[in-house]
Image (cartoon, rainbow, N blue to C red):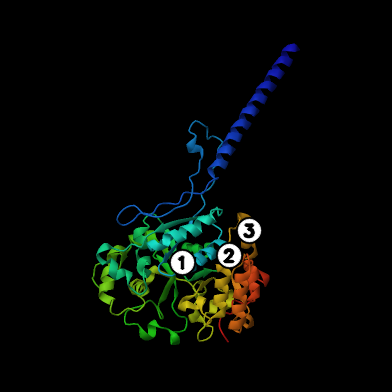
C-alpha cells in the first residue's frame, strides 16, 4: 500500500513541476511580446538621388525576442505589424503655419501610425523642429525633414516652375525610394476625416493604376482646362494635384507612353523632356505636366470624387460637388488664399479652429479628448452661420482667441462659427454648406 502512495505522490510532484515550468515559459514569452511593442517604430531614412538624406527623424527601435537570443521563443506571442501611412508635403516661403495646421488636422482624425515627410527650404527646418518636437507625446507620429532637391543640371528651372518648390512633388518617387505608397498634399489642405479613409483607396486600384487624383472641375462650363489649356489634359476637365495618392513602387517600374518618342519612358526619364516640350504652354506647372502624363496613360489613373479635394471652385458659381452634397466633405483644399481672407468665411473658420490646436503643450490625455470630441466623418457648416457671418463678428471672435490665455477647445471654436462635428447631427446629416448664398 505504501508503494502505491509513493508512486502517486511522485506522479503528483512531477506533474506540479511540469506545470510550473510551462507557466514560467509562458510568462517569459508574454514578457518578450510586450517588450516588442513598447517603443515607437524607427522612422525610415529616405534615400536621396545623390546619397544619404539630411534632416530629423524621431522614433526609437524596440526590443523583442531577437534581442534575447538565449531565450526560447517556443511559446512566444508575435504581434502583427501595424501598417504605417506615409504623408508628404512641400513647404517653401510663408507656408510654415499652413503646413503645421494641416498636420494638426491629420493627427486629430487619423488612426493608424503616420510617417510624415516634410520637404522644406533650409531656413524653415529649425522652425519645424521646434514645433513638431513638442508633439513627442504622440505615439503614432514620426516625421522626417528633407531639403528641397532637384536634378542638378536643371534645378533652377524646376524650382521656379509655377510656385517655388511646387514641382518637388514630381520627384518624390525618385527621392523616397524605400517608400511603397504615399499621400502627397499641398500645404493648404485640411483633413476632416481620418487619413486612413483615403489611404484605403489604394486597395481599390486595379493592376494598371499607379496614382489617384480628383477632377479639376465637375462642371465643364466653368472648367479651366477644357476652355483655356494649350496642352493635353486628362479626361473632360483635367485633374487637380493638390491631393495625390501614389503607389510609388508601380510609378518607378512603369514605362509611360508619350508624344515625344515611340519608346516608352520611365518616370525619371520622362519629366525633363516633358518640361522642355511644353514649358511655354503650361500655366499650372507640375499639375499640367501630370495632366499630360495621364492624358497619354489614362489607364494608370484612379479618379476619386471631389469630396476628397473640396475647393472654393466648388462654390464660386454655386455648389457643384454632388458627392459632397450627399456624403459630406472629406478633405478641404483652401486654395486661392481663402484661409486668409473673407471671401469664404466657412473655409477660414475651420482653418482658424484647427490652427489653434496645440497652441500650448498638450498632454496625451488632452489630445485624446480632442480626438474623441471631433471624431467625425466630416464637419458640417450651417449655411446661415457661415455664409452670412459679418467680418466684424469674425474679427470679434479672433480678438477673443488672442485675449484668452489658452485656446478654446476645437469643438468650442466650431460652435462659435456654428460649425459642428457630424456626429452631433446624425449620420444622415446634410453635408457642409460652404458656398456663399
Crowding at label 1, few (<14), some or many (≥20) Cα neighbours within 10 Å? some
User: What x and y, as percent, mark residue 363?
Assistant: 61, 55
- Residue shown at 42% from the left, 60% from the top: 125
- Can residue 428 be seen? no
Residue at 53% in and 48% down: 80
Residue 17's image quarter? top right
Choose between 179 and 55: the one closer to the eye: 55
Instruction: Please tell me whether mark 3 sits on a helix, a strand or a loop.
Output: helix
Q: As displayed, is residue 421 above or below residue 71?
A: below
The residue at which mark 3 appears reads as: 366
Secondary structure under the numbered disc 1 in the rendered image = helix
- Residue 96, numbered label: 1
Q: Residues within 10 Å of mark 3 (few under 14, many from 20)?
A: few
Q: Residues within 10 Å of mark 2 (few under 14, many from 20)?
A: many
Residue 171 on image: x %, y %: 34, 63
Q: Nearer the viewer, residue 139 or 173?
A: 139
Q: Quadrant of the C terminus?
A: bottom right
- Observer-side mark, 1 or 3, equals 1
Element type where label 2 sits in the image: loop
Instruction: Look at the image and tell me in which quarter the N terminus lies.
Output: top right
Q: From what the image shows, is residue 110 above or below residue 386?
A: above
Task: Give the spatial CA distance, label 1 vs label 3.
Answer: 24 Å
Label drawn at residue 325: none
Residue, disc 2: 357
The numbered mark, 2 or 3, whose residue comes first in the sequence reads 2
Q: Is residue 245 visible?
A: yes
Q: Distance from label 2 to label 3 (Cα)?
A: 11 Å
Amino acid at each position: 500500500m505504501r508503494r502505491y502512495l509513493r508512486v502517486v505522490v511522485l506522479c503528483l510532484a512531477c506533474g506540479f513541476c511540469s506545470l510550473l515550468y510551462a507557466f514560467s515559459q509562458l510568462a517569459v514569452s508574454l514578457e518578450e511580446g510586450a517588450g516588442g511593442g513598447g517603443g515607437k517604430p524607427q522612422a525610415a531614412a529616405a534615400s536621396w538621388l545623390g546619397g544619404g538624406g539630411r534632416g530629423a527623424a524621431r522614433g526609437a527601435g524596440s526590443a523583442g525576442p531577437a534581442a534575447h537570443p538565449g531565450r526560447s521563443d517556443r511559446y512566444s506571442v508575435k504581434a502583427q505589424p501595424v501598417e504605417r501611412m506615409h504623408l508628404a508635403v512641400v513647404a517653401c516661403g510663408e507656408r510654415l503655419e499652413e503646413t503645421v495646421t494641416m498636420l494638426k488636422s491629420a493627427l486629430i482624425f487619423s488612426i493608424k501610425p503616420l510617417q510624415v515627410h516634410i520637404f522644406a527650404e533650409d531656413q524653415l527646418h529649425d522652425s519645424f523642429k521646434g514645433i513638431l518636437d513638442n508633439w513627442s507625446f504622440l505615439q503614432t507620429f514620426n516625421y522626417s525633414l528633407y531639403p528641397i532637391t532637384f536634378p542638378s543640371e536643371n534645378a533652377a528651372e524646376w524650382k521656379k516652375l509655377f510656385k517655388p518648390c511646387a514641382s518637388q512633388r514630381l520627384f518624390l518617387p525618385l527621392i523616397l525610394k524605400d517608400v511603397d505608397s504615399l499621400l502627397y498634399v499641398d500645404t493648404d489642405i485640411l483633413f476632416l476625416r481620418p487619413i486612413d479613409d483615403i489611404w484605403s483607396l489604394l486597395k481599390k486600384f486595379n493592376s494598371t493604376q499607379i496614382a489617384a487624383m480628383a477632377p479639376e472641375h465637375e462642371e465643364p462650363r466653368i472648367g479651366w482646362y477644357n476652355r483655356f489649356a494649350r496642352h493635353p489634359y486628362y479626361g473632360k476637365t483635367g485633374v487637380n494635384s493638390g491631393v495625390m495618392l501614389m503607389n510609388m513602387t508601380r510609378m518607378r517600374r512603369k514605362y509611360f507612353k508619350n508624344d515625344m518618342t515611340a519608346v516608352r519612358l520611365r518616370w525619371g526619364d520622362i519629366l525633363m523632356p516633358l518640361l522642355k516640350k511644353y514649358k511655354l504652354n503650361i500655366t499650372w506647372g507640375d499639375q499640367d505636366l501630370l495632366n499630360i502624363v495621364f492624358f497619354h496613360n489614362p489607364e494608370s489613373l484612379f479618379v476619386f470624387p471631389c469630396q476628397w479635394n473640396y475647393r472654393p471652385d466648388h462654390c464660386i458659381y454655386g455648389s457643384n460637388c454632388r458627392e459632397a452634397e450627399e456624403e459630406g466633405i472629406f478633405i478641404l483644399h483652401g486654395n486661392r488664399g481663402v484661409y486668409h481672407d473673407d471671401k469664404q468665411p466657412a473655409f477660414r473658420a475651420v482653418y482658424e479652429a484647427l490652427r489653434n490646436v496645440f497652441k500650448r503643450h498638450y498632454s496625451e490625455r488632452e489630445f485624446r479628448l480632442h480626438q474623441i470630441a471631433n471624431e467625425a466623418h466630416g464637419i458640417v457648416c450651417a449655411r446661415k452661420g457661415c455664409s452670412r457671418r459679418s467680418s466684424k463678428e469674425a474679427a470679434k471672435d479672433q480678438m477673443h482667441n488672442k485675449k484668452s490665455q489658452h485656446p478654446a477647445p476645437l469643438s468650442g471654436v466650431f460652435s462659435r462659427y456654428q460649425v459642428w462635428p457630424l456626429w452631433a447631427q446624425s449620420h444622415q446629416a446634410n453635408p457642409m454648406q460652404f458656398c456663399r448664398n
